[in-house]
Image: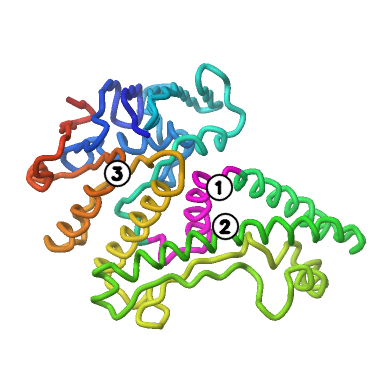
Amino acid sequence: MHLCDFNIINLRCISHASVELHKNINLIVGKNGSGKTSFLEGIYLLATGKNFSAAKRLDLIRDGSCSLGLAGLFVSDSGLESKIKLEKSSSKTSYTFQGQSVKKTSEVAVKIPVLVGNSRAADLLTNSPKARRDLLDRTAFHVEPNFLVVWQELRKALAHRNNILKSGRSSSELDYWDKMVSERSHELDLCRKQIVDKLNDYLRSSSLSEDLGGVWFDYRRGWGDGLSLSEHLKSNRESEFRIGYTLYGAHRADLRMRVAGKSGAKRLSKGQLKVAAFELIIALHEYISENGSTDPILLIDDLSAELDSGKRRYLIDKILKLSGQKIMSSIQPDMVELFDERRYKVFHVEQGNIT
């Protein structure tokens, strides 16, 4: 999968841009604050319906404008074209795929695999489990055709179960939803385990693992081993009625980094954390490429920050070897020297203007 044509209107500092991207490597060069990150975020927003920063709707719209617009032509590995348009104002969002209105952003996101590596990549390893669960699940969406349906059914079951817990109704009403949560959690768990196993195979052969005496991820499914999930849910109803939500299930899963057999994330420097996070993203990219129907689009923002030249070169070499489209931003135009003979395009960004 690659993004061929991309059009932007009133996205942060970018008033208007229309570019034709290379299907392999694209380098977006400019000073800090010039619009590089906004360009990448626009691609992610168009492909997923969500932004990869914590920006609110109004923060995305250019000052003095009432709305923003994005449009792109995505082309699959087999040549199938997909036209996507998105418009946002202060009060509403219009999102279309092939000219048809989209009700749920997941309907588009599942078709366009996109992975992001940026200056906040290390937060994946240190912040709440939700970010790591989401990354695992977005990977699964593009590999297992039924995963999205199962994931949605689990969310629905949890919403019903939590409503009963909050309202204090009879515990007998939980029986049906306990069964649903248990069955769907086991289905998600099986798929997640397969991804983590492949992920750890990749990490064990990485130079980071060699340098630190072993790096892998410990997957925790969201309930203990001593009891079945159904037994966990039934035996903890009193506690759950008291707090008003479900304590066990696939929605509580986590992925924790281990270094030399010990809890790892907090023991690493910022640079090591960033390398580890990018190794995770690269491994997931390879997993989707090998097991999914199309290569993911990889968005890389400000790779150089907090990395010495050796680690930067190490990661760039690994990224360039990946199949599929790579779109990278940098304040350093000489990064093209690392591309060797590979085909690429360079775009320059200055005060929101892209050439």
Compare marks 3 and 2 and give the one earlier in the sequence: 2
Mark 3, residue position = 323
Magenta-drawn segment:
123-145
- Is 140 in the magenta? yes
- Measured in 3D between alpha carbons, the distance from the residue under mark 3 to the one under mark 2, in whole angstroms, is 23 Å
Nearer to us in this view, 290 or 32: 290
Residue 319 in the image: x percent, y percent? 25, 50
What's the residue type where badge 2 is placed? Answer: Cys
Picture mark count: 3
Give coordinates of residue 244: x percent, y percent: 76, 62
Query: Does residue 248 appear left or right of residue 137 in this picture?
Result: right
- Decide: marks 2, 1 in contact (CB < 8 A)? yes
Residue under numbered circle 2: 191
Few, some or many residues within 10 Å of mark 3 (<14, 14–19, 20+): some
Query: Label 1 crowding class (10 Å Cα cut-off): few <14, some 14-19, many 20+?
Result: few
Q: Identify which residue is drawn at 40% across, 22% down.
A: 71
The residue under label 1 is 144
247 or 75, nearer to the observer: 75
The quadrant in which residue 12 appears is top left
Colour scheme of the rendered structure: rainbow
